[in-house]
Every structure is written in C-alpha cells, then in structure tokens.
Image: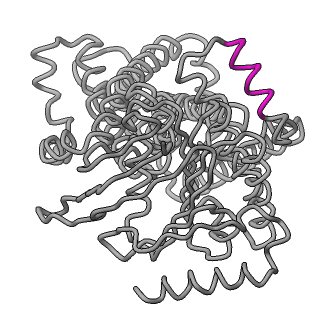
C-alpha cells in the first residue's frame, strides 16, 4: 500500500473513533447514570488497567477466539469445497446441515461444560461449532456457484481432482471464505462473551461481568474497550490477508 | 487416414428423469493438418460434441477416434472456450504455465516453454497482468498460448471469438490462420458466424437443430486466403451456407 493511502486510512479511522466518542459522551451526559460513564473516565480506567489487570484476560480471550477461528477454517473450508463440488454428497448432507444450522449452539453450553470441563476446551469447542457452520455453508455455496467453464477448461488440461481443488475451487472461493471469516469473527466475539460469563474466572467476558457485579462501571467499560480493540485488530489482520491473497479481486 | 473421425455418435442427457438426446447419428472426419468449422443454430449440441472430443464427456455411443486413439487417452488435444477459460486469480504467466505444471514438467522446462510461447504470441510484456486487465483479444491470445504451450496436435475451439468486437475478431481470425500455417495444427472450431466459417474452415459442417447431426458438408478452397474476404466465391459460399442454415431454422 502507498504511504499516502495508509495515511488516509489512518485519518478515516481517527475520524470514526472521534464520532464514536462524541456519541458516547453525549449519551452518557443525557442519561446521567453511573452505569454509563463518560469516555474520559472509561479511558482513564483503561489506561490504568491495560498494563496489569487486563492483559491476562485479553490474552486468554484472544487465544480462545483465534484457535476457534483456525479450527473451524481448517474443518469448514475443505468440507465446504467438497460438498460444493460433489452434487450427490451435497444433496445428501444438505438436510442434515439445514436441520442443525438454525439451532442456537449456545444451548449446548451446559452439556459441553459437563463433558469437556470448565477449561478452555469447552469454550473453544462451542465457538468453533458456531463459526464452523457459517464457514461451511458460505464455502459450499461459493463452490456450487463456480462457473462451469473454469472447471472444464482446467479439466481439459488433464487436471486431477486434487488439482481442481488447488487451482480452481480453493482460489475461486477464497474471497467468500474470507468474508465468512469476517462475519464469523463478529459471531465469535459475542459467543465468547457468553461462554466467559459462566464457570470461569478468566477472559475479558468474565472481567466485564465481574466489574459489573461489583458496580465498577469504569472498569467494565475499560473491558468493553479492550474487547472492541481486540476485534478491531483481528479485522485488520483478516483485511490484510485478503489484500495479499485475493489481490486479483481488487483490480 | 483421417486424423479425426467420428462415426454415428449419440449423446443423451438425463435431466429430471427424462432422457434428452443432444447428438444423434453424428459423423464427420477431418484429415491431419487441416481446419474444420462447425456451424449451426444455438443449442444444437455443438459444445457437447467438443466436450466428447476433449475427453471431458465419456458418456457417448459410437466411435470417436483421434489419431487412432480414444479422446480420453489422447493427450495432444487442447480446448479453448469462448469466455471464462482463463482463471481470473492467476496472472497471464501462471495461466499459461498451468498445463505444464499439471502434467509434471520440470520447473526449468516450464519456465523455458512458457517464456517461448508468450514471446511468440507477443504477450511477454503482459505476463504479470491478470485477465481482467487484458482486452478481449489479448485474453483470447493468452488462452491460445495456454493451449499451444502443450504443443497439441488438435486444437478444439468453442466460439472463441464471439465476444470480440468486429475488428478484433478479424484480427484474431488472421492470427489463427497465421498460427495454423506455421504450426500445422489440426483445428476444429465452432462458430455462429457465417463469414468466420468461410474464412477459417477448409471443411465446413452444418449442424441441425437439437438433437444435433451433420446435415451438410462443404469443402472450401477459399479458407485462409486473406484476399478472399471480398471475392464473389466467398460471398456465394456464405449465401449457400446461410440458406442451408435457414432451411432448418
């Protein structure tokens, strides 16, 4: 990216943050309740906490989201490509997917807690399950709608099935996969919050709920800021991946 | 002996439990180092035929022989499609070398042959561009390069120039003739365009409506003659083609 472009992006981000803070400030003044402190108080508390108390919570939450995203990608993408390419397997599996997809996976939290314990595993499995479906369905649909001409022309060069996945299906579906990852990230963050409020004393979700129950609203908002920043950084990371891997889309 | 011979080929599609015939009793032959053009109404099964010849569809009855071999066993066939043939996520260079890569050529050989063919077709300066950054004519040249890099004997083309504007189209027709004179490939091309058929095909096959079969065959001595485009014989043959197409429309 050009330095000028980068600068422009930076300015846009600053403006967005500014607008967000102004709205927040106005709202907190309007409501005038301790439950919504002004941005100044929240940021003060954030700066105080960010170097000590917040760090381990943010790290563990980051770990949970990143691992879940990675596992669901590794499982969802190949399966989605396979189903999108093989009509018969797709027809066979579609009812199964559509029957289990709409069930809110968080209802399984108690079962996972019993089966997998209260450690990281149960949380990662639940978040993975939620994002896995999203990636699977998006990838499958992208592979299904691939123009036949691409497949035909490459097949006529005597490509094997594996070659087709490598040279046609995967690169063609990559933009859709990255979009599903971006959507999945938002879902992962909300599921993360939920799983971290049960039977755990670690993670940013726990930190926020704990601050709330001790009526430390400034700490609570410091936690929310940390969560927002974490999501923002992950989005930037995904954007960077897209720029590098799918440069052909932006021509 | 003919390089390409097709005898009473039948192809059917099963769609919604109904059998729809696509090709019926289709026979044609083409001798080595010659050009043939198939012309016919839309949906008459022309593309189905090329699919069979390229070895993509093995579900047919009848005999198809390319240089004495079945299509699937024949590695010397190249297929060029109207659009979408090039992969938009690969640069010109990567698109052209794909065939070599798939057939397990060494890295050195791949680079050497890719460079040679791009240079020959005047595409070397475009090697880092993606297909969307190329004009229609350039794109079709790259598609041709991708096929020629494998040094095929038979070139199958499915309406290769139909999305090009009139002038680019004529340029590409000239280019194809030059290429044919130089490489002595056997070329079988499908088109909708009557003038294109007369300019390119030493043999012209007229196909019927679906289920497709060859209803008329012309031997055409004018093919490949640059000066022929305005001549009386050229127009006469075009008219004759037009009426035999009309007769079945």
User: Measured from the top left, where is residue A114 in percent x and y?
Assistant: 10, 16
* Vertical order, B163 against B6 (above or below): below
Give the quadrant of residue A69: top left
Q: Residue at coordinates 45% horizontally, 21% vertically from top-left?
A: A66
Q: Is B109 contained in the magenta span?
A: yes
Foreground: A169 or B26?
B26
Q: Is A198 contained in the magenta span?
A: no
Say whether residue B184 is left or right of residue A174.
right
Magenta extent: B107-117
Q: Residue at coordinates 40% horizontally, 29% vertically from top-left?
A: A208
Rendered image coloring scheme: one colour
Image quarter (top left, top right, bottom left or bottom right) of the C terminus of chain B: bottom left
Give the quadrant of residue B155: top right
Q: What is the tally of numbered marks visible in this picture?
A: 0
Residue B73, visible in the rendered structure: yes
User: Measured from the top left, where is residue B226 in percent x and y?
Assistant: 83, 66
Say whether residue B42 is left or right of residue B138.
left
Q: Residue at coordinates 26% horizontally, 10% vertically from top-left?
A: A119
User: Measured from the top left, where is residue A68 in percent x and y?
Assistant: 37, 23
Residue A243, visible in the rendered structure: no
Foreground: B243 or B118?
B243
Q: Residue furthest front?
A: B1
User: Measured from the top left, where is residue B92 in percent x and y?
Assistant: 72, 38
Label the magenta part by its dominant secondary structure.
Answer: helix
Say whether residue A38 is left or right of residue A172.
right
* Vertical order, B28 against A137 (above or below): below
């Amino acid at each position: 990216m050009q330095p000028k472009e980068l600068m422009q992006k930076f300015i846009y981000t600053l403006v967005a943050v500014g607008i967000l803070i102004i709205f927040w400030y106005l709202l907190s003044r309007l409501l005038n309740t301790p439950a919504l402190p002004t941005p100044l108080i929240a940021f003060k508390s954030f700066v105080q906490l960010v170097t000590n108390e917040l760090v381990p919570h943010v790290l563990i939450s980051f770990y949970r989201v990143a691992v879940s995203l990675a596992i669901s990608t590794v499982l969802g993408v190949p399966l989605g490509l396979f189903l999108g390419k093989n009509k018969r397997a797709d027809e066979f599996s579609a009812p199964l997917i559509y029957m289990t997809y709409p069930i809110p996976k968080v209802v399984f939290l108690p079962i996972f807690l019993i089966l997998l314990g209260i450690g990281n595993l149960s949380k990662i499995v639940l978040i993975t399950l939620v994002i896995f479906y999203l990636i699977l369905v998006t990838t499958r649909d992208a592979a299904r709608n691939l123009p036949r001409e691409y497949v035909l022309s490459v097949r006529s060069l005597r490509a094997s099935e594996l070659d087709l996945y490598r040279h046609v299906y995967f690169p063609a579906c990559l933009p859709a996969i990255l979009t599903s990852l971006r959507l999945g990230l938002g879902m992962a963050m909300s599921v993360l919050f939920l799983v971290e409020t049960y039977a755990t004393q670690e993670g940013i979700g726990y930190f926020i709920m704990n601050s709330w129950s001790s009526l430390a609203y400034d700490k609570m908002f410091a936690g929310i800021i940390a969560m927002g920043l974490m999501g923002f950084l992950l989005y930037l990371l995904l954007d960077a991946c897209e720029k590098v891997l799918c440069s052909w889309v932006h021509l | 002996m003919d390089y390409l011979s097709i005898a009473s080929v039948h192809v059917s599609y099963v769609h919604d439990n109904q059998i729809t015939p696509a090709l019926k009793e289709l026979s044609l032959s083409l001798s080595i180092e010659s050009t043939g053009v198939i012309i016919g109404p839309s949906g008459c099964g022309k593309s189905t035929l090329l699919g069979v010849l390229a070895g993509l569809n093995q579900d047919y009855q009848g005999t198809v022989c390319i240089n004495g071999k079945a299509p699937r066993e024949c590695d010397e066939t190249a297929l060029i499609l109207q659009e979408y043939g090039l992969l938009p996520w690969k640069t010109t260079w990567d698109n052209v070398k794909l065939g070599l890569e798939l057939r397990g050529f060494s890295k050195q050989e791949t680079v050497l042959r890719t460079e040679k063919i791009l240079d020959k077709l005047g595409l070397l300066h475009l090697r880092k561009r993606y297909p969307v950054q190329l004009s229609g004519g350039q794109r079709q040249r790259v598609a041709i390069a991708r096929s020629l890099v494998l040094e095929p004997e038979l070139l199958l083309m499915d309406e290769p120039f139909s999305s090009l504007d009139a002038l680019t189209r004529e340029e590409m027709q000239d280019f194809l003739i030059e290429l044919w004179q130089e490489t002595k490939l056997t070329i079988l091309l499908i088109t909708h365009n009557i003038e294109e058929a007369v300019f390119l095909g030493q043999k012209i096959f007229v196909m019927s409506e679906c289920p497709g079969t060859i209803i008329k065959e012309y031997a055409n001595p004018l093919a490949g003659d640059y000066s022929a485009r305005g001549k009386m014989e050229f127009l006469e043959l075009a008219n004759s083609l037009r009426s035999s197409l009309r007769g079945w429309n």
